[in-house]
Image: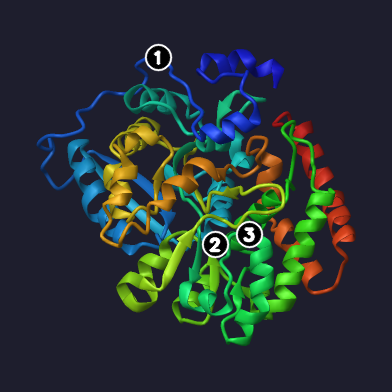
Amino acid sequence: MAENDDELEELGISTSLTRRQLVRRGLGGFLVAYAGALPKVAAAGVPKYVHKHYKNTLKIIQWSHFVPAYDVWFDKTYTKNWGAKHDTDVQVDHIALAQLPARAQAEVAAQSGHDIFGHLSPQAGLEDQVINHKEIIQEVTRKVGKVSQVGFKSCYNPKTRKWHGFPENYVPDPIHFRKDLWNQVGIKPSTWDDVRRAAPKLKALGHPVGLGMSNELDSNMLLIALMQCFGAFIQNAQARPAINSKHTIEALKMMRDIYKRGMTNEVFAWTAASNNQGYLSGRLSLAVNAISIIRSAEDANPALAQNTSVAPIPRGPVQRLGLEHVMGVYTIWKFSKQKTLAKRFIADLEMNYQGAFKNSKFYNFPAFRGAVHDYARQLAADPHKGKYNVLDLIARKYTVNLGYPGFSNAAVDEIFNTWLVPQMFAQVAQGKMTPADAASAALHEFKPIFAKWRGRGKI
């Protein structure tokens, strides 16, 4: 990192902070003078363009949000109003989250597609295919203040000094648990050992624990977070593979024990929606997921919602440290024909993020904390008896980037998108490998991936 200190100081990020200090602060950041690269347009007022046939077209693709109200607002209100002000027909396509990585690769292969691509995890492996998003970062920073440390380490490459994406939002990842069932077994899921002790009793009640070990996003995020609670990481701060450690072995043992004691084999074939569905059906006693679960329950099953607690990830023997459930990253392709408009759209959305925060029902947290005024107060004002206050705590203290304690990079991106961590856990839980053998085999898989991307000058 020493060779990048000048760049970090330029961005206003102190290089003297320790990792522990960065985690405690939760928000790193920088203040950069805006060089005036983006066109200036008023954020509010009467739309200048009122005719139906607009001069420009801006194409956006992103996931079908787990909070449907968000897509209604984004598609029918926000983009329509923004487009009217900018003489632009904003066209939004939605696809299932599991289809995003393959669709991105397809657009790269064709060198054609959308102007803005919305990802749900950092996509450092696509760095050569996207613009440097630094000037958008600069403008937003000047307007609303610092980018979060999660956003910074997710989208900035200290090796190439390039912003390979724009961190639009991140999503805190709490646990959901049934208070009535956990009260029956006399345990609260404060630690992973609590979960292990309670698991067989909950399963005996007909309500197993729901922790995925499948090739899908939720399982990936959960298992990496579990590892972090045990002091285990995919890489170290110097971007060297660190998976083969005693801490990883202990995390693998824990998940194996929880599975054998209190889960069913369905978790090896889950999709990203499965834990939502299992919990909302009333069957699961615990799930690790964003607040899409509790928000859905409030609409469809108020009694279940009232009986559900939302809490930070259980503490491990080393620490309590989670991962963002998803990291909303916008990228602009180099082959986009509307780069200037795309930059303007992203900057305007982030600088006026209150609408996104509110209409996602607090699902989307701004990657720039200052983009939403006093969001802790808004969480407290939610009518559901302060249930969402804990999200601020989770966001500030227990949420780090994919690839922590290092930066999200192309090697971590490849490991994440090829499901190597869930496969490691599944091999152990199913008794196909010992924890020690699985950790060693994972290192054997990780090493050539890191070597490849280091050889390409990306880490």
Q: Looking at the image, how many numbered discs can be counted on the residues? A: 3
- State the separation of the CA atoms marked 1 and 3: 44 Å
Q: Is residue 11 above or below residue 391?
A: above
The amino acid on which the numbered mark 2 sits, given as a three-letter code, is Ala
Q: Is residue 260 above or below residue 312?
A: below
The amino acid on which the numbered mark 1 sits, given as a three-letter code, is Ala
Q: Which residue is pictured at 69% across the width and 63% down the height? A: 193
Classed neighbour count for the residue bearing mark 1: other residues with Cα under 10 Å, few (<14), some (14–19), many (≥20) = few
Q: Furthest-front residue in view?
A: 186
Judging by the rendered image, the residue that carries numbered circle 2 is 98
Question: Which residue is nearer to you in this view: 313 or 144?
Answer: 313
Q: Is residue 317 left or right of residue 78?
A: right
Q: Which residue is pictured at 47% across the width and 29% down the height? A: 133
- Marks 1, 2: nearer the viewer: 1
The amino acid on which the numbered mark 3 sits, given as a three-letter code, is Thr
Q: Is residue 309 left or right of residue 449?
A: left
Residue 285, position as x, y percentages in the image: 54, 75
Judging by the rendered image, the residue that carries numbered circle 3 is 191
Judging by the rendered image, the residue that carries numbered circle 1 is 33
Residue 335, position as x, y percentages in the image: 49, 37
Q: Which residue is pictured at 60% across the width and 34% down the height? A: 128
Q: Which quadrant is the C terminus positioned in? A: top right
Classed neighbour count for the residue bearing mark 3: other residues with Cα under 10 Å, few (<14), some (14–19), many (≥20) = some
Question: Which residue is nearer to you in this view: 193 or 85?
Answer: 193
Q: Which mark identifies residue 289?
A: none
- State the separation of the CA atoms marked 1 and 2: 38 Å
Q: Earlier in the sequence, mark 3 or mark 2?
A: 2
The chosen color scheme is rainbow
SS for callout 1: loop
**Res 249 quadrant in image:** bottom right
